[in-house]
Amino acid sequence: MTDTLTESRRPRQAGRRERQEPSRPAARRRNWAGGLAGWLWLAVVAVPLYWTLITSFKAQNRYYAGNPLVPTADPTLDNYRLVIESDFLRYFVNSVVVTAGAVVPAVLFSFMAAYAIVRGWRMRTLRAMNGLFLMGLAIPLQATVIPVYLIIIKLQLYDSLPALILPSIAFAIPLSVLVLSNFIRDVPKELFDSMRVDGATEWTTLWRLAAPLTRPAILTVSIFNALTIWNGFLLPLILTQSPDRRTLPLALWTFQGQYGVNVPAVVAAVVLTTLPVLVLYAFGRRQLLSGLTAGFSR
Amino acid sequence: MSVLISHQPRRGPRSILPWLAAPALVVFVGFAVIPLVGVFALSFTTWDGIGGIHPSGLTSWRAVLTDPGLPHALGVTFLVMAVSWAVQTPLSILLGTFMAGRQRYRAVLGVVYFVPLMLSSAAIALAYKALLDPNFGLGAGLKIQVLSQDWLGRPGLAFAVVVFVVSWQFIPFHSLIYQGGVQQIPKSLYEAAQLDGAGRIRQFFSITLPQLKYTIITSSTLMVVGSLTFFDLIFILTEGGPGDATRVLALDMYKRGFQASLMGPASAIAVILVLVGLALALLLRRLGGRDAGASQLEGA
């Protein structure tokens, strides 16, 4: 899958020195169109990121003078100070609570459901359940936010963090069940049979056999859901009201409303809210990326 | 089908398996299925979002269906969908093929390519809003006339910016899918083509593209259905403006419901959104033939 970015099948270096075209396998020949697109795309991606980063260190009064693509000679952390003083620590904690509070049950429930669906495929109820979850993939779940808002009000959860957690779990289930059931299906039948011969219950088999064997998939699905929920904007926008319930993306938006003309401060807020994810990206890039395409590149 | 296979575990009516699926089912029904039915029901009511909910028959539907805003929003939605598909697909295939190559430097470029995937739409939209500011943005700072236009203030430009930012955010994801697809193409096909004297470009069009058929369908489905949910990005970048130049369905729903307090008509828009999404998913599935759908969805 995606981890073929690794060196596992690197070309033999010899191919680079040889000039006779026909002996080189096609995939290693120069791909001019691809190469051009590759470098152009690098610029398209990198310039806005670079601009955002260097601007966040510029003093507001110096910002308008000078070349915007040259880092300032005397960088300042004032913008970051302003962002942190605007309660971003609290928003960070809120985001962590909502993300962890939603991802753990979402993945746990999805894993149990995926196991049941794979093992109980002969049962009509479970096949129907699978169909129901799959339907959730085709429907833009944003379209359900008005009733979700109503339900949250009726549950008296409006303007609380659980209000964000519950729908996030529900929205995460379809894709998680799909991916996890794909992986559980790959576990050899014989292993299940031998567990059964040993007298293991489905519950034990679930935890002793299926969970350890699909651990990479579980991690991958968790990462995907965590990123989606961490970056979510619509649910916090409609289900919360008070400033101290904001999660980071929403706080970012209100911060911009407040300090709109202070461009360096706004981009500093952008950098700061992005930092936690980028740190994770630096450490677990491969896992993150395979998490993102989970279930799609199979 | 129902032939009893001896090595299948026996499952009586007391099997615990359905219970294992119960928690997921409960949450999903409570916060996805019931809301889905609920949005349909709410479209036949009048509700301001705070007070009581009153049944009002077809009032909301009549209001929505006679409002010229609906065909406009539908038009903008499909236009965003079509243009961003047409921009993203060739670029993603090209970049995916490029990154499927084994050169080390490509992997290094990949590190930068995928950064946008980590960022929230809110962060991306805010950064671009600052960057494109006609007075204080990048273009103005560089004193380049062409770049210091009122990007978000003019209908055509604002639409182009939305498509550009959407592409900026999602092309990495789709090229990742294509990269995986290209790497699964058997090497022997290229070797055979080479023996037949097929050139690089010929190979791309006769082998790579046809072999990517199912990847293209998967990626396109995600793009098309996903484009219905571009809410945060457009909301922050343009708020549907200027005027209503970038007012897509999802934004229309939000504005009617949560800004104008017309939950009934907003629910009607949401129903239309659901129907459009379902229709597109079914259409694309048919295009791909049953094989693709079956293996994709059932993992067989």
Image (cartoon, coloured by chain):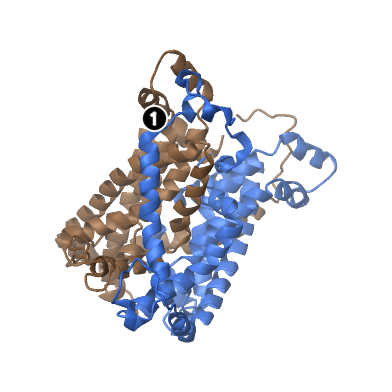
Q: Residue furthest right?
A: A198
Dot 1: chain letter = B
From the viewer's perspective, is B197 left or right of A193? Answer: left
Residue in view at x 48 percent, y 86 percent = A85
Residue A198 visible in this rendered orientation of the protein: yes
Q: Amino acid at mark 1?
A: Leu
From the viewer's perspective, is B286 left or right of A130? Answer: left
Viewer-closest of A57 and A252: A57
Locate residue B72: give its quadrant.
bottom left
From the viewer's perspective, is B221 left or right of A113? Answer: left
Q: Can you give x and y, in whole percent of width and height, for residue B66 in the image?
A: 14, 61
From the viewer's perspective, is A37 left or right of B19? Answer: left
Locate residue A237: give its quadrant.
bottom left
Q: Quadrant of the N terminus of chain A?
A: top right
Residue in view at x 57 percent, y 32 percent = A11
Q: Colour of chain B?
A: brown
Q: Which residue is under mark 1?
A: B209
Locate residue B269: give its quadrant.
bottom left
Viewer-closest of A209 and A246: A246
* Secondary structure of the residue carrying numbered label 1: helix
Q: Can you give x and y, in whole percent of width and height, for residue A247 in the image?
A: 48, 75
Give me the chain that's blue.
A
Vertical relation: B288 (above or below) A253: above
Vertical relation: B47 (above or below) A105: below
